[in-house]
Amino acid sequence: MARTNINVGTSANDGTGDTLRDAFVAVNAMTTEIYGDNFVTHDRLENRYTAKATSSSTGSQNLDASAASTFLLTGNITTATLTIQNMKLGQSIDVILSGTLTSAVITLADDFTTSTISKVGSTDLDTAETNIIQVICLDDTDSAAKLVYSINKYETDTTP
């Protein structure tokens, strides 16, 4: 529903504006739209914000950020290029490397024409542990895209 203007007349109490009833009918209609069934819930979000993709493939893989926000890679990950596709400004994805990493050498790539991928922090891949790579898109301009990532080992621990 589009915004509804309430006619308040030319001056106070001149009788040219909407009746009190008509004004509040319009207010109720607009309030119902805002607070009614159109609010955003987790179930209404696209898969790019809510879905998990699992792969047991080995080697290089394409990670489609329009299809999932979490990628669980469980295969024997040796020398592999992980190509991140369809990232949008402000989007964040998680790549969990829980497969065999003993001889893993990971390279990140993307599908932008020109981009910069930068690392945040100084931690590198730990081939003896499960790792999580978090990637954030800072700019999705095709000719000047910017992605940043961080990587850390992933283990159960309730004490930060």
Image (cartoon, grey):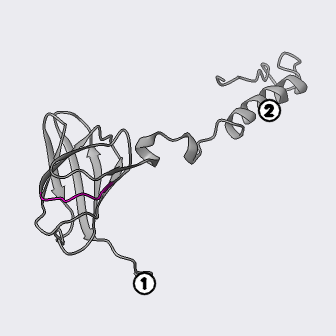
Depicted 134 relative to depicted 49: above or below: below
The image shows residue 27 at horizontal and vertical percentages of 78, 31
Q: Secondary structure at mark 2?
A: helix
- Specify start and end residues of the magenta stretch as a single range: 72-78
The image shows residue 158 at horizontal and vertical percentages of 45, 81
User: Where on the picture, by quarter, is residue 143?
Assistant: top left
Residue nearest the viewer, comparing 57 with 94: 57
- Mark 2 lies on residue: 28
Residue nearest the viewer, comparing 44 with 39: 44
Residue 159: mark in rendering = 1
Q: Is residue 31 left or right of residue 20?
A: left
User: Image quadrant for the N terminus?
Assistant: top right
Q: Is residue 74 magenta?
A: yes
Residue nearest the viewer, comparing 60 with 145: 60
Residue depicted at 10% across the width and 66% down the height = 103
Q: Secondary structure at mark 1?
A: loop
> Pointer 1: residues within 10 angstroms few (<14), some, or many (20+)?
few
Residue depicted at 35% across the width and 47% down the height = 90
Residue 115: mark in rendering = none
User: Where on the picture, by quarter, is residue 19?
Assistant: top right
Q: Main secondary structure of the magenta part?
A: loop
Q: How many marks?
A: 2
Residue depicted at 25% across the width and 63% down the height = 99
The image shows residue 21 at horizontal and vertical percentages of 90, 26
Residue that sits furthest to the top in the current view: 16
- Residue type marked 2: Asn
Q: Is residue 36 left or right of residue 24?
A: left
Mark 1 vs mark 2, CA separation in Å? 48 Å
